[in-house]
Amino acid sequence: MDTAEPLLAALPAALRPLSDPPTAPGWNHREIAELLGDTPRREAAVLIGLREGVQPRLVFTVRTRQLQAHAGQVAFPGGRREVEDADAVDTALRESEEEVGLERAQVEPLGFLDCLETISGYCVTPVVGRIAEDAVLYPMPAEVAEVFAAAGLLP
C-alpha cells in the first residue's frame, strides 16, 4: 500500500465539497478591505495539486520575470476566471493546462479551501486535486519559467 494513501483518502473530509464551493467575500476580507475598500474583487482560481506517488508532492510554478503582474513569484497554477469558464474548477484546470501543460484528465478534483482575497484585487478560490503520478508537466514560457513538485511538505 502506498504510504500516502491514508492521507490522501482522508483529505476530502477536510475540504469544502465540490458541491459547495466557497463564495466571496474571502476569509481575509476585513484585512484586504482596509487596504482596497469594498470594491468587487475579480474571480480567480488556483489548483493546489497533490501529485500522487510514494510521497505526495505539491505542484508549484515560478512565474516568468517579464510578466506585468506577479513576475518571478512562486505560485500555484491558476489565474483569472474567463467568461467561458463554468466554475472555479474549470478555471483552475484551464489555467493549469495553459501554464504547465496539465491535461484535465490527469486531475481528480477533491474539494475547495475557503476563498482568499488578494492585494491585487482578486478573490481566489483554491481547488484541491490529485494529479496522476504519470502526468507530464512543463512550463509554458509565456507565463511560467519553471514548474516543480515539492516533497516533504506533508506528514
Image (tube, rainbow, N blue to C red):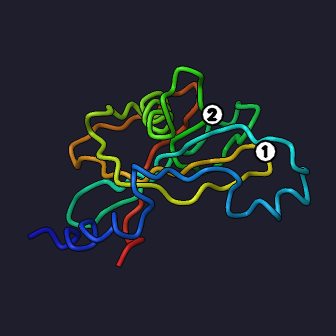
Residue picked out by circle 1 = 120
Query: Residue shown at 56%/42% (left/top)?
Result: 45
Q: Secondary structure at mark 1?
A: loop
Q: Position of residue 94 (x, y in %)?
A: 45, 30
Give the image location of residue 43, x and y in percent.
65, 38
Q: Amino acid at mark 1?
A: Ser
Q: Determine whether the residue tagged by mark 2 lies in a helix, strand or loop.
A: strand
Residue at 73%, 63% (x, y): give it. 28
Of all residues, the one furthest to the front in this rendering is 20
**Image position of 54 (left or right of 24):** left
Mark 2: which amino acid?
Arg
Q: Give the residue displayed 59% in from the left and 22% down from the top.
A: 83
Q: Residue at x 63, y 36 (%)?
A: 64
Which of pointers 1 and 2 lies earlier in the amino acid sequence?
A: 2
Q: Position of residue 114 (x, y in %)?
A: 57, 59
Which dot marks residue 80? Answer: 2
The 10 Å Cα crowd at callout 1, few under 14, some 14 to 19, many 20 or more, is few
- Nearest the camera: 20 or 79? 20
Q: Is residue 58 above or below residue 90?
A: below
